[in-house]
Image (cartoon, rainbow, N blue to C red):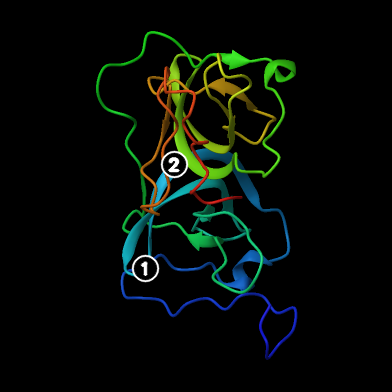
Amino acid sequence: MSVDVPFSRPAHPAPVAGDAERAPRELMTLPGMHHEVRRWHLVEVRLGGRWRPAMLSVWRRPPGSTSWAVHVRWGPDGPGPGEEPWAWLLYSAATIRPLPEPSGPTPLRDAVVVPPEMAGAPALDDSGRCWRLAWIRIGGRWRSALVTEQRRPARDLPWIASARWGEDRQAGWLVADPATVRPLPAEDPAAITLPTPGAPDTAAPPAATGEKG
């Protein structure tokens, strides 16, 4: 919302040469059946003259089109004016590229799932909320994921993270083991990463100074 036009959508920043191209409304609203594939994948997208990590969640080919449009999100929704944190973009390998999976030794285990009834209650000040893109180890492979909350059920228990890794209710609470839950480096230098198992009990919630969703 802006002062000049109440309830208006945030203005898009002026594109920079080499940026990903937004899919025109005329293309996205063509009548007929759109071919659509929902598949989450961590990518880098060229925006504002720089590469930004993002989550690509939908591929869509409008009727009669030879091009794909992709839904990409690079930040959480939030109140007030500002740039929208998502867009439909025309796919091009020059402006949207997959992020490589984590390097180093491959874990021999999956991320440990925590039953919801053992996840505990959220912090009263909502300090556990966050928005962090991450790789998680599920089903013997790395999955593109989004971490939306972190908490510690009790002082003698490890930190856990609420993660989502797909459209079909693929979500759950996971033990925040850095071997199997690996957030991408935060764009905001003030944001801190998921905690290391065995961190002191006095440690602040890991997302206390990071972005909230």
Identify the residue at image location x=24%, y=22%.
104
Q: Position of residue 185 (x, y in %)?
A: 36, 43
Judge whether 174 appears above or below 207 on screen: above
Query: In this image, 79 relative to 191: left or right?
Result: right
Q: Secondary structure at mark 2?
A: strand
Contact, CB < 8 Å: mark 2 with mark 1?
A: no
Identify the residue at image location x=58%, y=52%.
60
Q: Position of residue 168 (x, y in %)?
A: 68, 31
- Structural distance between the alpha carbons of marks 2 and 1: 18 Å
**Residue placed farthest to the left in the image?**
104
Q: Secondary structure at mark 1?
A: loop
Front in this rendered view, residue 201 or 100: 201
Q: Amino acid at mark 2?
A: Leu
Q: Position of residue 68 (x, y in %)?
A: 51, 55
Q: Residues within 10 Å of mark 2 (few under 14, many from 20)?
A: many
Residue 18 picture quarter? bottom left
Identify the residue at image location x=31%, y=63%.
50
Query: In this image, 100 relative to 195: left or right?
Result: left
Q: Earlier in the sequence, mark 2 or mark 1?
A: 1
Judge whether 87 appears above or below 197 on screen: below
Residue 149 picture quarter? top right
Residue underneath mark 1: 19
Residue underneath mark 2: 42
Q: Position of residue 78 (x, y in %)?
A: 63, 61
Front in this rendered view, residue 179 or 44: 179
Query: In this image, 166 relative to 20: left or right?
Result: right
